[in-house]
Each structure stands twice: as structure tokens, then as C-alpha cells.
Amino acid sequence: MDGQPDSAQGDWGPFGRPLFDDPQARRLSRVGVVDIGSNSVRLVVFDGAARSPAYFYNEKIMCGLGAGMPETGFLNPEGKQRALSALARFQALAQGMGIPALTVVATAAMREAEDGPAFRLEIEQETGLKVWVIDGEEEARLSAQGVLLGWPGADGLICDIGGSSMELAQLSGGAVGRRVTSPLGPLRFKDLEGGRKAREKHIRKHIAALLDKIDVTGERMFLVGGSWRAIARIDMERRGYPLHVLHEYRMDMEAVAETLRFIEKADLEELRGKCSISNARMSLVPYAAEVLTELVAAFEPSEIAISSYGIREGLLYEQMPQKLRDRDPLIEACRFSEKKDARLPGFGKTLYNFVLPLYANSPETRLRIVKAACLLHDVSWRAHPDYRAETCFDLATRANLGGLDHPERVFLGLALLHRYRNKRGGTRFEDFYSLLSEEQQRHAEVLGKAMRFGSMLWMSDASPKATARMEWDDDTQALALHLSAEAAPLFGEVAEARFNSLARALGAKSTKVERSD
């Protein structure tokens, strides 16, 4: 197959060659981090393509270290025992996984409790883990870096809520700017004397102070933290939203207001069950909702996005060389998946160049999705043929792929579905299609059918004379296929049927197949 060059670099445009085999990237291929928060203690082990890592292992214990601390000044005794037990287990797990050392950070509860230093020493003596107790500004910086893991070059305001504190950080052009911290974690004020009115006064006072220090109004707001994610999941329930992927879920100020009213009127236990939210988390949601009400009113964000990436992902980002940070997380993850799971690793690039004539003058935002689809077009080949289309759709819409908003996930999933299936009707995914316009659905079908046809023309690099290329004339709506004599035998009956199916999806007025001698 022969197509147009991707760019002057000749290898996937501005993203260069894959970096996951680079020694610096492989050093990051399995990294374990532990976050000791005021509400939970969590271990995450990252594995895979370092720029867009998979979660090799993820375990959380709701210890409630900060529960009762505003009144006593000390860490919760029961929480300390649960945390110590969890950390001993995490250390043993890490040793079993061959991880040389865990990176362990502790946040608001341990930095502010009178017995925080003593508990830190106890952890180190009992488990051998070195614990780094970080201040609020460092917590904000790491959370912002976690957001950059999924949104390279992001601009806006990061808002990370934990059990005992809330941090804000400014992002501009992919760089972390001013950072501030506040005591607006729900564990700290939920039992404030005076009830709701006292809480509202308390929250408004601290948000006004934040606004004086970091005046970032009218920009995009990234919400980080379990309480925000729980509110977003409830927003999905209220809307009947089909795609239950929290990362990159979008809301606006009106949606937030409606959902907060919905929470106030709801039976919280019933809602908790429907949304699969833990008891411990759900108990904090009403108080986090009060914070979000005032936060949105003060900063008036143009858009609100949920980030599943936070401080733990920020710790991984911290260890990356800059050349890795600059990569597109979507493309790197798809390349890694192709290398690991495709029948012919490397064919995705050939396929991309083959379909590229259909995308003349397309913006890079469209081309990166085309690249991702071509890389993933064959990674589900081991699935039963009757279910490959569904497996592909699930992969694109639910996998841990950074750098994709929800409509892009569905577009990618629909394109991959059409890679294995002519029609999109009659699937269990039809509710998802509503996230795309009819025109976007048609474009996804064209891409899928182009890959479906192109995958019939497997050619070896050892046969350079076997070439196939397409031409699309947008003015005359004409589709042409040019085959060298060596490639012509590949254009059999099934390939011809798929070529004609692609032409119909394009709305081609004419088709032409040329075979050269």
C-alpha cells in the first residue's frame, strides 16, 4: 500500500517515533505510588505506555484519617490502624510485583495533625516506606500535573477537593502557575456548629479569599477528587447519560445547579445504590455539593471537566522526561496497544497513509483520531468474529485512553465498529450515538469502512512493488483505486465489495479501479 506522507517528518506528524521502547520510558513502565489522604489511602501501580499508562493495580481503603480532627487536633485512631494495615499490605504487594520502591505522599490530615509526625515515623518503622508529607501548594502542583497527563497544553483552573482541604492551581499553556490551598475539605466543616447557614458562611469566606489570590474567572475548570467524581456520576444519572466514563465528562454551570438541586431532593441511599458510590463517599457528597455551588458562582467557569487524573498521576508525570511529556497520550497508548495485540504490528501506519487521501485539508484534531483508529483497527482480532465489532466499541469508549473527550470516544468506537460491521443499527450501543451528530456518525462510518477495505490489502515491506493507493476528488465526488500489477491479485471479490461499500458511504458519484502493468 502506498499513501500520502503524513508530514515532512515522515513518521506520524509532530509525534515522531514511538517512545515506549526508549530506556527512559521503559524505566517508567511500572511505577507504584501511594496517596495517604484525609479520607482514603490508595495504591496505584501504573504499567504500559508510559505517556498514557494503564492501571496495572488500583486499591483504595477508606480510612478516614482526618475524621474528627477539627475537634481533637489528632488523627482518627481507628483510621490510623486501618491506614497502617493498608500500607503494610501495599508494601508487600509492591514487592511481589517487583517494584523497587513505592513513592508515598501524605496530604492535609498528616501535615496538620499534632500526631502526624509521630504517625509518619511509625509507618516508616513498621513498613519501611518513606513517607513524604507535602504542603498544600505542592499538592496543588502535583494535581495540576496529573491533569496535564491527560490534557497536554491545558489552560484553566484545577480544583482538587480532598477530605480536609481543597487546592486550586492555574494552568496556562501546559504550565502550572499560581497554587493556593484552603481548609474546604468536607471532613473539616461538615459538623460545623450552626448547621447549613454556618457552613455556607464558612465556605463563602474561604472562596472569597481564594478568589483574591487566584483570580481565574470565566475559564475552563478541571475538577479533581472523589467527591467531585461522585457528583458527576450523579449528574449522569439525572441526565440518563449513556457513557459512564468520568474522565473528560463535561458539565456547565446550569447542569451543576440542576444536579445540586437533584441531590438535595433525592433519597441519598437510593441514589448511592444507583450510582455505585460508597457509603463513606456518599456521606461527604452533600457537603462537597455546597462547596461546588459557591465555587462555580465565584469563578463562573466557561466549562467544567472532570479529571480522573490527580495527585497520583501527577507523581508519575513528575518522573517523566520532557520529551515524553510532550507526546500525545492518545497516540502513544494506541501505538503501545498495536505493538502488544495486533496481528501485524506496524500496519496501522501503512493503513493510515492509505486512507489519508480521504482527509485532505483535515485539521490535526481529526487526523489524530484517524491515526488512533488505524492503530487500533486490529487489536481485537482475538475476539469471536460475532463480537469483534462490539469489543472494538467497548475498547474505544471504556479503555483508559487519555486525550479524548466523550464525543471523540464514541466517534472512535463507531469507526472501529464499522471496521467489522457494515451497519451500526441493532447494536446495544445505539444510545451512545446521540453524543454525535448525524454528520459525525457518517464520518465515523466512512473511516470504519475505509479501514475495513484497507485491511484487505495487507502487503509486506519485502514486496515494495506491491502498491495500492486511493484518490478522492471532493469536487466531483469520485473515488479511484490504483493498484500495481503485484497488488492486483489482492483485489478479490470481498475486497471489491468493501470498496463499493466505502464508495456508498462517501456518497461517491463515480468509482474507478486502475491496474498498472
Image (cartoon, rainbow, N blue to C red):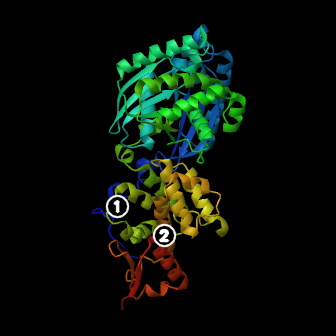
Give the amino acid at mark 2: Met
> Residue farthest to the bottom?
517
Give the amino acid at mark 1: Ser
Q: Label 1, on which residue?
A: 362
For the N terminus, which image quadrant? bottom left
- Which circle, 2 or 1, is nearer the viewer? 1
Image check: 484 left or right of 164? left
Distance Cα–Cα, label 2 vs label 1: 17 Å
Residue at 45 percent of width and 78 percent of height: 459
Q: Quadrant of residue 286?
A: top right
Q: Is residue 94 visible?
A: no
Image check: 202 left or right of 211? right
* Secondary structure found at label 1: loop
**Sequence-wise, which precedes: disc 2 or disc 1?**
1
For the C terminus, which image quadrant? bottom left
Vertically, is 44 above or below 168? Answer: below
Q: Residues within 10 Å of mark 1 (few under 14, many from 20)?
A: few
Q: Is residue 221 visible?
A: yes
Q: Quadrant of residue 191?
A: top right
Residue at 58 percent of width and 60 percent of height: 392
Q: Residues within 10 Å of mark 2 (few under 14, many from 20)?
A: many
Place of residue 25 in the rendered image (x, y in percent of width and height, measured from the top left): 43, 48
Place of residue 72 in the rendered image (x, y in percent of width and height, measured from the top left): 61, 8
> Residue farthest to the left?
8
Place of residue 132 in the rendered image (x, y in percent of width and height, measured from the top left): 49, 25
Vertically, is 412 above or below 490? Answer: above
* Secondary structure found at label 2: helix
Q: Quadrant of residue 141?
A: top left
Q: Label 2, on which residue?
A: 451
Residue at 53 percent of width and 81 percent of height: 497
Place of residue 261 in the rendered image (x, y in percent of width and height, measured from the top left): 59, 28
Depth check, front residue: 75 or 235: 235
